Amino acid sequence: MTNVEFQKIILSWYRKNGRHDPRASRRASLPWRKTRNPWHILISEVMLQQTQVPRVLTKYPPFIRRFPTAQVLARVSLRDVLAEWQGMGYNRRAVHLRELAKTLVRKRSGKVPASIDELQSLPGIGPNTAGAIRAFAFDRKSVFVETNIRRVFLHHFFRRRRNIPDAEILLAVERTLPARNFRRWYYALMDYGALALKSRPNPNRRSAHYTRQSAFRGSPRELRGKIIAALIRHGSVSPDALRGRVALLLGRRCPAKEFSAIVNRMMQEGIIVKQNGRITIKH
């Protein structure tokens, strides 16, 4: 298959079925595709890390209303940010977003950079997120991969191979890039991977980076979320009181050893602190 043939397949499908027009596709449109605001697009890309689109659809609009600019986010408490973030999981992303906002205000008057190197220098922004922000916020050439893009390239170019590293996929992504309209091209790839290939066996299982996510119930992720929820609700509490409140939120016993290990880890990450024998969210 030539690059031109591949582009025709993807773009032809996208014109008829993509999530660009809910009247044509009969699917919910994605609000972050309706804006050119780099800050709003950055927020959406951080939210979409490790989180399914339906969940982001419920959290993105209120988060943007609450923190419409980097300046607004930079000056609020971490507790306020985590309160808006609740339900998204992986709370370190919210911590990084607040640090990122402070960095943008301090160094760039709150403006999101278009440079890949500058984007990657920001807290919580890796090469793929940086590439997505550059393409979607600025419509500039970039090379990146995410779950749905990976699925497309594994399906079309690596059908008979297993354990394919992203480095090889990125070469294929770069080779098939169009000369312009990078935003549209990546939207088309992502929709094709998410929708057109949905009913097929998941090609991502042949990726060298494929891992099946463990069940949420009973996982450290669940316990971390309940700790944050309890601290947002109750403020500063003793470790024993916090464990009791977490157990109530879980609806089951909270083992002391597991609880202590996760609390210590969250303190090391700078999410929570212990002051005068009481635990609270870091200011």
Image (cartoon, rainbow, N blue to C red):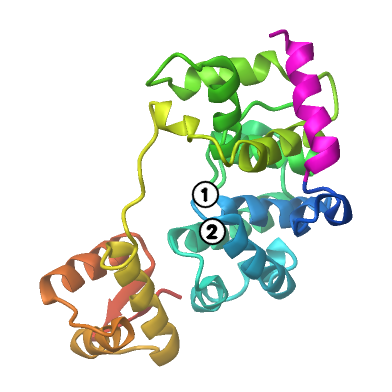
Q: Mark 2 points at which residue?
A: 99
274 sits to left or right of 84: left
> Residue 49 location, x and y as percent?
53, 50
Q: Residue furthest front?
A: 199
Which one is in front, 234 or 252? 252
| Residue 153 seen in this snapshot | yes
Q: Which of 268 and 216 is in front in this view?
A: 216
The stretch in magenta equals 1-18
In the picture shown, does residue 179 fall above or below 42?
A: above
Q: Which is the main secondary structure of the residues drawn in magenta?
A: helix
Secondary structure category for the residue under label 1: loop
Q: Answer with left or right where residue 224 lies relative to residue 107.
A: left
Q: Disc number at residue 123?
A: 1
Task: Quadrant for residue 238, please give it.
Answer: bottom left
Residue 109 seen in render: no
Q: In this view, does 191 lie above or below 207?
A: below
- x and y percentages locating residue 218 in the rendered image: 26, 67
Q: Where is residue 61 in the image (x, y as percent from the top left)?
A: 71, 69
Magenta span has 167?
A: no
Using a 10 Å C-alpha cutoff, classify the residue at mark 1 as few (fewer than 14 neighbours), some (14 to 19) or many (20 or more).
some
Give the residue displayed 28% in from the left and 63% down from the top.
220
Q: Does the magenta stretch include residue 2?
A: yes
Q: At 43% from the left edge and 20% from the top edge, which residue is drawn?
A: 164
Vertically, is 266 above or below 193? below
Q: Indicate the amino acid at tag 2.
A: Glu
Under mark 1, the amino acid is: Pro
